[in-house]
Amino acid sequence: MRYILLLTLLIQAFDAFSSPAEEPPDTSIRFLESAREIFGTQANFAANRLDSFFATERADDEFGRSRIRIRSQYFIRERAVSDLNNQYRVNLKLPRLEQKFRYDDEDENRKKKRRKNSPVREADLTEKLTRDRIATGWLFNADVGVTAAIPPRLTTRGRIRKTFLTGTLINRFVEQLTYVTSEDGLQEETQLNTDYIYSDEFFFRFVNEKRWQILQKEFNTNHGPTWWHRLTEDDAFIYGATFQTIINNSPWYVNNYRLSVNYRRNLYRQWIYFDVIPGLDFPKVWSFRRTPFITLQLEVLFGT
């Protein structure tokens, strides 16, 4: 009897080693693939990379950066006096306030119930909620800036941001409220830019921007296609063909057409940059005659 019992235990042990228990499916890989399809490196790498290189506000906001930005611009324009403009800006990351703009479309009790009844479907639910959160999440950011003038002008801004998909296009919505301690006073701005990714180094962005200077009762818009192109790790271009409109106690009309090229060079370790921005304006005030200009910009970035 003892030998029979021992033989039975050996057979059970052999079966356990030869037929291991089936492991649960690895949902993390499917999640990564789904996230990559929406906002991963394949779909959004070029836009994120170039926005970061050009130190745009979107890069600071979406990548969770707090930065100090010092920017010096020198403008040269035909039939106009040259001008030097110095700006100092501090971008603040406010995670607690940002969290208030995030939401989940299913409460905790319903998620627990789903997890108990169907653990496999819970993985699908987690994937769906993650996709929805990426596509519908809101971001809140604020920054403070100072313009070197006499007297200095202080600028405070708060904005909410949302990114969503329509097919192969990536749409970026921004609503911003700005207060300037000057005659400009309170300003409201809205942006809806649309990206189409060609490759890791090249993408297309159609710009739609609106600015309302509330106290000045002036309404401006900017529209048009731009192409963002990175040549090397330290060099990139933005090619633009845009037009501007205005309402200022008058009917809505186009007041300028612009062709421009923005060349940006990383001078030192991704915190000192130099821009050369030549272009042509066709302003209505000069009967849409060709008006060349060039802007020289030096930018220094501190922060993460």
Image (cartoon, rainbow, N blue to C red):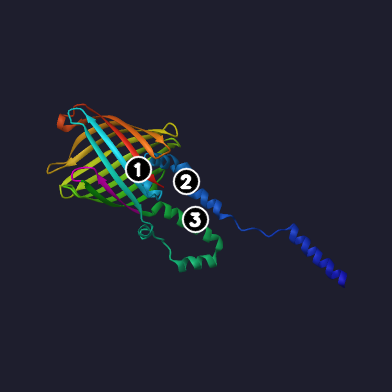
Instruction: State yes or no: residue 150 in magenta.
Output: yes
Q: Residues within 10 Å of mark 2 (few under 14, many from 20)?
A: few
Q: Residues within 10 Å of mark 1 (few under 14, many from 20)?
A: few
Looking at the rendered structure, which numbered label has been put on residue 179? none
Looking at the rendered structure, which numbered label has been put on residue 40? 2
Q: Residue 36, how many percent across, how many down? A: 49, 47
Mark 2 vs mark 3, foreground winner is 2
Amino acid bearing label 3:
Glu
Q: Which residue is painted at 15% across and 50% down in the image?
A: 215
Mark 1 vs mark 2, foreground winner is 1
Main secondary structure of the magenta stretch: strand
CA separation in Å, label 1 and label 2: 19 Å
Q: Residue 236, how many percent across, how many down? A: 39, 33
- Please state the extent of the stretch shown in magenta in the rendering: 140-151
Which residue of the protein is positioned furthest toward the front in this rendering?
150
Q: Quadrant of residue 256?
A: top left
Element at label 2:
loop
Q: Which residue is painted at 42% across and 52% down in the image?
A: 134
Q: Residue 156, how many percent across, how many down? A: 26, 51
Q: Residue 250, how many percent across, how many down? A: 12, 42
Mark closer to the chain start, 2 or 3: 2
Instruction: State yes or no: residue 213 in magenta.
Output: no
Mark closer to the chain start, 1 or 2: 2
- According to the picture, the residue beneath numbered tag 1 turns out to be 56
Element at label 1:
loop
Q: Residues within 10 Å of mark 3 (few under 14, many from 20)?
A: some
Eyeballing the image, is 254 above or below 166? above
CA separation in Å, label 2 and label 3: 14 Å
Q: Which residue is painted at 84% across and 66% down in the image?
A: 7
Amino acid bearing label 2:
Gly
Amino acid bearing label 1:
Thr
Looking at the rendered structure, which numbered label has been put on residue 127? 3
